[in-house]
Amino acid sequence: MQHVLLCPGNRKNNSHMSNKIIFLLLLLAGLTCFSGSTYSQPYQPVPTKINDLVHTQLKVSFDYEKCYLYGEEWITLMPHCYPTDSLKLDAKGMDIKSIALVKRNKTVPLHYTYDSLRLNIVLDRSYSSKEKYCIYVSYTARPNERHCGKDEKGLYFTNPNGAQKNKPIQIYTQGEPDYTSCWVPTIDEPNQKSTTEISMTVPAQYVSLSNGKLVTQKKNKNGTRTDTWVMDRPHSPYLFMMAVGDFRIYKDYWKGKEVSYYLEPSYAAYSKAIFGSTPEAINFFSVITGVDFPWNKYAQVAVRDFVSGAMENTTAAVHGEGVQGNEKELSDRGYDFGIVHELSHQWFGDYVTADSWNSLTMNESFADLAEILWAEYKYGQDAADEHLHQNMYGYLHSESDARKPLMRYQYDRKKEVFDGVTYQKGGRILNMLRHYLGNDAFYKGLNIYLTYNAFKNANPAQLQQAMEEACGKDLHWFFRQWYYGAGHPVLDISYQYDSLAGVQQVYLRQLQDGQTFILPLAIDLYIAGKTVRKQVWMNTICDTFSFPVAGRPDLVNVDAEKVLITKKTDHKTLPVYAFQYFQAPLYEDRLEAIEAAIGSPKDPVAQQILLAALHDKYHGLRLTALRSLDMQDSLIKSAAYPAILDIVKNDTDRTLQAQAVVLSARYNNTLNLTLYKKLLAAPSYKVQGAALWAINQLSPAEALSLARQLESDSKNDLSESIYTVYTSSGGDAEWEYVYNRYLSKFGEQRFNITEKFANILGRVKDPAYAQQGVEAIKKMTIQYKKYGIAPRIIPMLSKVKVKRLEMHDQASADAIDKAVVQINEAAF
């Protein structure tokens, strides 16, 4: 697809221009970028507002056996602009019992039609935009009976009958993008906002959570309790929420406002370790935006089987069960950005909400930026830059994402806009804007944006206007190319030094199809121990920059701030990259040098970079270097050993330490056994698992004995190592653990551990165990036969058969023959 970029032109400051005119101008510019080609997806307009939600009052109860919600709703509305005598409500898959107009505490039945997705209601008369009216709806929501994806039900009953032994009974909702209307009739669009009052009748032994403040709790005679939650500030329907379950609540505070954490009882002791940074993060975002946390409380709840990563419901964020963890699990995790991502939405998404899913960038790009800002503040510049790099890498390696603009007008399904463009690219676009304007102007712009649009909806036009007001600069060029155009620059960078003229030249070429980008750039020149920064603009597809210099620069560092969203080919030599590693300050500078060294592992300069990187100040780069070592190279292996052993003994990053343990085992030094045994007591499943694996390489008998001792408290990496030890050396006593571990895996994960599983089948003495295992392998192979795994599984079973016959176990051998026949006969 060819993209044409309009040339930037001068225009007057539009701070007093209406938002609508700005929006139309930007829309025109954005659509022009795609002239000469058309989208196959339909155009998606901002939803027309005929009626406005004002207040939503709900009374709900739950049928756990049927997975039903019984609801009564009183919904107050006003015509948005023009008089209307009708109302349309989204209501997916419900039984509608009655609909009536509420007048002077009396109900007047109304005529309506319903097609299982939308209610079309005829009002008793025409209402003007100054008149409120109230509709009563009695209904039953049946989410499990809808024919839709599992992530489209809106309301979820987890283990409702308690049949699953180790899973709690819970209820939760997930409304984004338009699934709240699966459990309450509403106008399910982001440009609607309503105050809410939600009364939930729940089993008395359970805890409830919803938006806003818990105002009353009433015990009922039938063993239930009715909790009423009130949200007195308007928020969009997709942010309405409920959760019910056996949660333990830990209460924190920020400036007198409750900050609470809802967790399963077994994780209650770790509440502070899991969520304890929340008050500090609330304060951080309040300070940088200049807008104090705008709601009356903030709660976070962890639920089982959550259908999304997490959800930023107003005042009550929902996280998946993965956020929970004991001391060892938490120790093994890297920086957790999910908590600050959802928290930042309380400003960007909840307080000011995208006016449509076309403008989802106004929610999610800001939340992605929030992760970067928090990392910079809390963990340091290297951590922030690593996060920038990793997520940008994901976007840059998606060809389809490069064809999509950030402001999306055309798509088939709303879920399509929840992608690497809206999140990763969008966050990095905002980060570029921050660097271009400077922190003071950028944060001033955020304050203007949030203050002017408080409790309302917005799109990029409002953001542009706010930023221009803050900085006094024209930003049309920036928003046109990054918000309304698609793709990114693909840069080729080369250099030439003219010693006679005393000039350093930098040649830049944009190689991408589509628009030509305007790029403000910082270029650093490193000469004779000093660094000089040059600020330049690349305005054309090819540009040359010439800098008078006193001598040949040791390094010319293009995009010295490392903020551009770009794929680049930088024609530097390895010696220059070595200088860059040791002298340039940023994570990305050092990473570029390490990656260049990885590309030439036999070069002595490359080896110098990699060995130095084992001592890098940032653990992420130490890990990158560690993983890239060529352990087949005797010189590297010998030179790296002291650094590897130092990481094993002293590093506090558990992933890095565990990786070093595994590498150290390749030296086959039995003197390290004592060290590995000591590490079995580490407060980390990763380190314990690596240590047990290393012991198994040196002394399998000791590893087997130690694995039995560790089994009672084993998760994650440690469980994997125990599985490895048991399948290589264990027998009947270890069968139950191995078998249950095998069944706990699904799909590719189970296939990947099948060869180890087959090993123990040839060793257990009890034929019943062998046949049980063969049956499990057979079922897995038939289930995933369409992926072509049978030719790899059958030889494994043949090896097991040989071993069973050696043990005079004809019954198991026959079971294997039968399994192979069934695998071969099974249809894809």
Image (cartoon, rainbow, N blue to C red):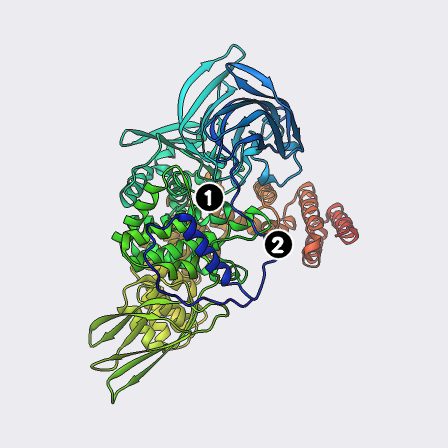
Between 96 and 803, the one nearer to me in the picture:
96
Of callouts 1 and 2, the N-terminal one: 1
Between 631 and 405, the one nearer to me in the picture:
405
Amino acid at circle 2? Glu
Query: In x, y percent, where is residue 295?
Result: 35, 32
Q: Is residue 418 above or below residue 62?
A: below
Between 367 and 352, the one nearer to me in the picture:
352
Q: How far is mark 1 from mark 2, CA to CA?
A: 53 Å
| Residue furthest bottom as drawn | 500
Q: Is residue 714 visible?
A: no
Query: In x, y percent, where is residue 578?
Result: 32, 73
Q: Can you identify the residue that label 1 sits on? A: 355
Disc number placed over residue 511 in the picture, else none: none
Which callout, 1 or 2, points to the residue nearer the camera? 1
Q: Can you identify the residue that label 2 sits on? A: 755
Give me the residue at 22% from left, 71% from top.
531
| Residue furthest top as drawn | 221
Between 726 and 105, the one nearer to me in the picture:
105
Amino acid at circle 1? Asp
